[in-house]
Amino acid sequence: MPETTAELVNLLDLKREGEVFVGSQPQTMMQRTYGGQVLAQALTAAYGTVGSGRTAHSLHAYFLRPGAVTAPISYEVDALRDGNTFSTRQVTAIQGENEIFTMAASFHAEEPGLDHNDPEPMYVPPPDHCPSLADVMDDRFGKQPIWHEWDAIDARFIGDSTPGGSIKPGRHIASMRLWVRTESALPDGIALHQAVMAYLSDLALLSVSTVPHPVVFMSDQLQAARQSTTRCGSTANSVPMSGCSMTCTHRRPLMRFRGSRRAGSSRMDGWLRPAPRGTHPAGG
């Protein structure tokens, strides 16, 4: 997996062959392709067929089969519609003769409209006071090289709602919070920033689902799979995320995860502020 931001950007630089885009595979110890990589490359492929000035504001994807880490992935893009202000794309990821993934995405031309932000959350420790996610994994499961598969991402663990955890279960009994950013600044460009956001979005989605249960996520007795994901945003520069809205206004893409997977707005120091509990920035 990418170890630096530059390697991550290179992973999202697809080769175009007609209406098909081909994504490379990084060196990895994982047995199957990381879902966030497929989602990010698919979004990049869709952007490659959309005119400038239109930004992704929603997408829905299904993971049909596991991707092999030893073969490149081809992304076929079908231009379903180009209207006055909206464009719709269908992307199918293929390895060999198998379709492994499908995604529908909508793009919108920027135009004036309503805009607002949720208030900042209270009592959330700053990133510098939080351990890295890799250190947390070392403490919980022992030192393993696989924890460094995501070294291109600077992830800090705020806490979760496990018994004795720092987050008290509320309306969402499964909660986990992370500060997340790339390890160094990204080049400018909303398409790249949104693709990196899509890449980040899969970092903790499965692990948070086990928080309220007496199981260990990394146990060999647990098999987990994610079949679909939805990303939505409410403005032209919202970054599509699972069940949430995100705004990318800084050169480093930022996000935080929790069980409800809500998000807030960006900070100028490169981190995204966690969203307050009980907010619904994307309308549910």
Image (cartoon, grey):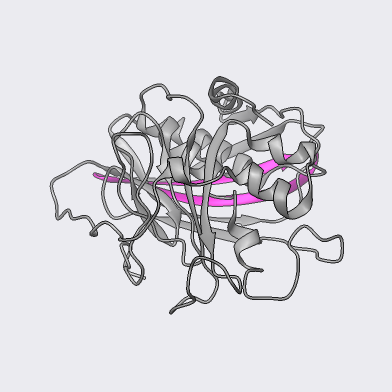
Q: Is residue 8 left or right of residue 84?
A: right
Q: Residue furthest right?
A: 220
Q: Magenta region, mostly helix, strand or loop?
A: strand
Q: Is residue 84 left or right of residue 220?
A: left
Q: Nearer the viewer, residue 72 or 115?
A: 115
Task: Check the picture and name the quadrant holding the C terminus.
Answer: bottom left
Give coordinates of residue 93: x percent, y percent: 65, 42
Asked which quadrant contains residue 34, the reply is top right
- Give the answer, above or below, for where 115 lies relative to 161: above
Q: Residue at x 59, y 50 (%)?
A: 202
The verdict on residue 242 being magenta is no
Magenta stretch in the rendered image:
84-107
- Give the answer, above or below, for where 219 lies relative to 134: below
Q: Is residue 107 left or right of residue 179?
A: left
Asked which quadrant contains residue 221, the reply is bottom right
Q: Nearer the viewer, residue 269 or 129?
A: 129
Give coordinates of residue 39: x percent, y percent: 57, 44
Give coordinates of residue 277: x percent, y percent: 36, 68
Q: Residue at x 41, y 36 (%)?
A: 253
